[in-house]
Image (cartoon, rainbow, N blue to C red):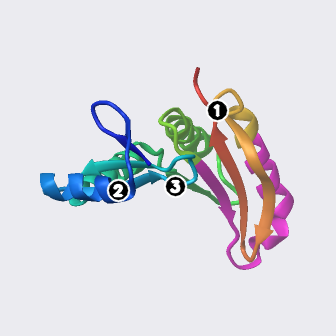
Amino acid sequence: MILEGKEPIVVTTAKALSMAQDEGLDLVLIAEKADPPVCKIIDYKKFLYDQKKKQKEIASKAMKVVIKEIRFGPQTDDHDYEFKLKHARKFLEDGAKLKSFVFFRGRSIIYKEQGELLLLRLAQDVADLGKVEALPHLEGKRMFILIAPIKKK
């Protein structure tokens, strides 16, 4: 058994256990598949605490996906469209995904083509900031498009 510390040393299991007990610490198996197995004399609770701390740090650094929504009607006017386009561009610049949808009320479902054209126009207008992940598709009374931001170098 290799005992890691200031300098790695090769000892028997019994000797390693007695060394750990003398120091009031724990003998922790680091790599059991190594030949000979590698152990370390450490405070096991502190070791677990440090591992949890590292995991938490890694999780906090992980990028969280934010999805922003923009809602249109099938008869959206040019001024309203430009206003919402400005918001869509800002969301994509901030690194959020954009979920844009056209909501059809009542009998306005007969304007499906207008809704699809509106969403495709939006995708084309923000093409420099984002790429389309999902083309327009209809779910119930809503037609969706999903746009992801382009990674900056």
x and y percentages locating residue 32 in the rendered image? 52, 55
Q: Is residue 112 above or below residue 92?
A: below
Residue at horizontal 58%, vertical 25%? 152
- Between disc 3 and disc 1, whose residue precedes? 3
x and y percentages locating residue 12 in the rendered image? 39, 52
Q: Is residue 39 above or below residue 128?
A: below
Q: CA distance from mark 1 to mark 2?
A: 45 Å
The secondary structure making up most of the magenta span is helix
- The quarter in which the C terminus is drawn is top right
> What residue is disc 2 on?
28
The magenta stretch spans which residues?
98-121
x and y percentages locating residue 53 in the rendered image? 29, 51
Q: CA distance from mark 3 to mark 2?
A: 10 Å
> What residue is disc 1 on?
150
- Between disc 1 and disc 2, whose residue precedes? 2
Looking at the image, residue 125 sits to the left or right of residue 99; the answer is: right
> Is residue 43 something one can see in this rendering?
no
Is 62 or 92 nearer to us in this picture?
A: 62
> Is residue 134 something one can see in this rendering?
yes
Is 63 or 3 nearer to us in this picture?
A: 3
> Which mark is nearer the camera, 1 or 2?
2
Q: Is residue 71 above or below residue 127?
A: below
Which image quadrant is residue 71 in?
bottom right
Please name the amino acid that badge 3 sits on: Glu
Please name the amino acid that badge 2 sits on: Val
> What residue is disc 3 on?
32
Does the magenta segment cover residue 101? yes
Is 93 or 45 nearer to us in this picture?
A: 45
Residue at horizontal 64%, vertical 54%? 100
